[in-house]
Amino acid sequence: MIIRRRLGGLVLLGACALPGAAIAAAPTSPETATPALPQEFASGDPAFYEVPNPIPAGEHGDLVRWQVVASSFTNRYRIMYLSETVAGAPTVVTGLVEAPDDLAPFGGWRLLLYGHSATGFGDHCAPSSAIDDPSVDLDGADEFERFGSDSWVVVSTDYEGLGGPGIHPLLVGVSAGRSMLDAGRAARQLPTLYVGPTTLVAGFEEGGHAALWAGELAPAWTPEQSIVATAVAAPATEVAALATSAASQPGSEYLPLAIATGLASTGPEALVALGTILTPAGSELLSQWDGACFGADLTVPGPYLSADLTTVEPFASSMAENTAGSVATAGPVLIIHGDADARVPVEHSAALLARLCAAGQVAERRVLAGTTHGSVLSDLSSSGVDWLTGVADGTATPVSSCG
Amino acid sequence: MKRRRLMVLAMVGAVAIPTAARATAPTPPEVGSADPGPVEYAQDDPTFYEAPNPMPTGEHGDLVRWQVLESSFDRLYRIMYLSQNVAGAPIVVTGLVSVPDDIAPFGGFPVLLYGHGTTGMADACAPSVAIDNDNAFGDYDGEFNGVAGTANAWVTVATDYEGLGGPGPHPFIVGVSEGRGMLDAGRAAGQIPGVYLSDTTAITGFSQGGHAALWAAQLAAEWMPERTIIGTVVGAPASDPAALASWAASQPELSALSVGLVAGLATTYPEAQAALGQVLTPSGIELVEAWGTTHCFDQQVDVPGPFVAADPGTVEPFASLLTANTAGTTATSAPMLIFHGDADERIPVVHSDALLARLCAAGQVVERRVLPGGFHVSSGINLDAIAWLDGLAAGTTTPISSC
């Protein structure tokens, strides 16, 4: 199946230093009448994830498909929507939407765009797929469930290439930001929901990176979506520093390869470069990622790359370009980070705060003593959610941690 | 969405006007003429019924306003939507929509269009006005509540009819006005954000609403071709206005009904307005005035009879106009069911003998169920009617012909 061959194909391409033509080649489009969008799929219909061929015409953010996901308490939907790759090609992205089981308030529901943490590269690692797949236990799906609320509609993109076509551009800011924003547009097109313009953003780890990129892109990409506030936990904003720190961090050694793979998904140059530094172990790990998500125990010892990514072009430049949080946005930003984080070092968010402050952003950083990478999520879903709600209600005055 | 884009286009167009052109044309852009799409009104905002000025542009059936109503069971909305009067001028009409408090089934909720029985001609007699008005004299919303409660798998859409609640006089018993009012309400209901409707549509009505339903069924193929009408159910339909006017004129206790019929024609046909004095006494004219402004049909107007000077069924232009508004003169592709009590004290059961004969001659598949001993109110849209429609929707009902 396509899913299982994707990363294998990537390895092959990289190793043989082939140009990226094969990636760009779109399947030939059959001459069929395009169905009216959006299209509802029956609950449980697995054809939901079949990539539409051709990609339907429309604007990025247009809802292409939706499907009810069985849930006892809330109204939960799987969505597929139009977005655009970094190269500007139309693509479809999948995600999850959860709405309170209640009549929308005057003006419609608020919307929370949620960016989940890194789950992997396989389509089965997409939270929207894992959420009702008993064979996959995925943090990303659990995260989504934490952010359901009786006061907003939560929309969690799977990100480009997770669930949808192509390889997931992990930590590629433009891709992540577009996926988040377009998911918000798409959710507003669900015939069953009434969603107003108020938009909040939250994200954890990879999703923190995505959330900040969404805020940066929003004014130009989805100007109708006014982002009121953004809360991130342990955000993976310092991509280059993360590649360096993770290489020597037990349990995170795979991250540089994951970052390189994400960057390689966007263009032939990085793909060729990946082929030159990929070790046999790295190649084996890529093959395993076709079937296993990041949380699984992998038994391939490193090193996976033969060089430090920060010393290899185009990765060095590309990682710098994908740093998140470089411009000020209208809404305030809250950063929550545990000082016992063994995945994303706490000093990364110190660098983020300094950068945001220099850009003129109203940003508050809360460093939580003794809090680990995994446990900071519950702070985001409690105090972070309270802060978002307070800002949206106008009852909380955003604080600045800038010196 | 289409409308939003058009609005954006219009705005871009406005901005793109060259400075020179602006200088010579200092008048501001006509903000009011741009179609803003449906506008939500806060619950209990009494300005809901104020006539929009200018009349919004758009197609008949476009939702203009909606407002949530307090309801313990279903999701209840008041709507105002675009329609067209008999002369072809754009008008707004109000109505009620009840949505089951459930997640919509695959494909959306089926739609039950309901035409209510006669309440009067003044705005206070509109079901959508009476529903949250504790001071309302009569139970003008009771029928709607009963039908919505019985048709619990359907979205019940009940127009108030032209001029009842909304601006202008109410063309009581004018078939084209009633039919358009019913059909356009169905279109508008599907535009309430978060209300997800399928194309499956049933047309139902009681008494005056039976007349309206038959006209709606007759007009549907042209006026609302995008919806699939699966069946029409009418109870004690006022299908033969000419016969009804003559009969009522001959009954002292029902002569007011005759007055209502000619008053309805007078709202739409200037020749009828000019000839009112030929069929009504001065008391009858006073009655018409009271009905147009303050009194519902069940409210005592302190005017002595007699009201009727001559049988409108024998005086032109009333005779021809009444006959022109006869319902059920052509066959429709969907089956019909007629309920009528053989002891109906308002609309004699022989009227539906004639209706059945007319429909059969036209080739309509129609079943009539005569209710032994049934009075007028016995023919309301009840469980039997909904069961028949549920069966049609599910494909389990085989329509029967009484021809």
Image: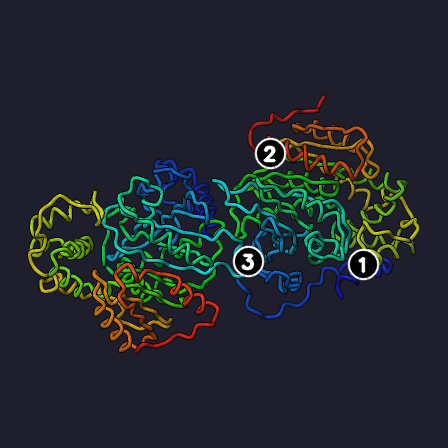
Label 1 marks which chain's residue? A
The answer to whether tags 1 and 3 share a subunit is yes
Q: Amino acid under label 1?
A: Gly
Q: Quadrant of residue B70?
A: top left
| Element type where label 3 sits in the image | loop
Q: Which residue sits at x=41%, y=43%?
A: B69
> Can you tell which mark lies on residue A38?
3
Amino acid bearing label 3: Pro
Q: Work out how far the residue at label 2 is from the one at label 1, CA to CA, in angstroms.
A: 39 Å
**Residue B256, how many percent across, how many down?**
15, 54
Residue B205 sits in quarter: bottom left
Q: Dot 2, crowdedness within 10 Å: few (<14), some or many (≥20)?
A: some
Please report, as a chain letter, where disc 2 is located: A
- Please name which of the two marks, 2 or 1, marks the residue nearer to the observer: 2
| Disc 3: host chain | A
Q: Please name which of the two marks, 2 or 3, marks the residue nearer to the observer.
A: 2
Q: Could you say whether the residue bearing mark 1 is in a helix, strand or loop?
A: loop
Residue of label 2: A389
Q: Earlier in the sequence, mark 1 or mark 3?
A: 3
The residue sitting at 9% across, 47% down in the picture is B304
Question: Could you tell me residue A329's position as x and y percent?
Answer: 63, 33
Q: B304 and B210: which one is in front?
A: B304
Mark 1 residue crowding within 10 angstroms, few (<14) / some (14–19) / many (20+) = some
Give the left or right position of residue B215, taking residue B156 as reference: left
Give the foreground label among 1 and 3: 1
Q: CA distance from mark 2 to mark 3?
A: 31 Å
* Discs 2 and 3 lie in a common subunit: yes
Direction from residue B314 to residue A107 in the image, left or right? right
Type of amino acid under label 2: Thr
Are the residues tagged 1 and 3 within 8 Å (C-beta)? no
Question: Which numbered disc flags the more N-terminal residue, 2 or 3?
Answer: 3
Residue at numbered disc 1: A291
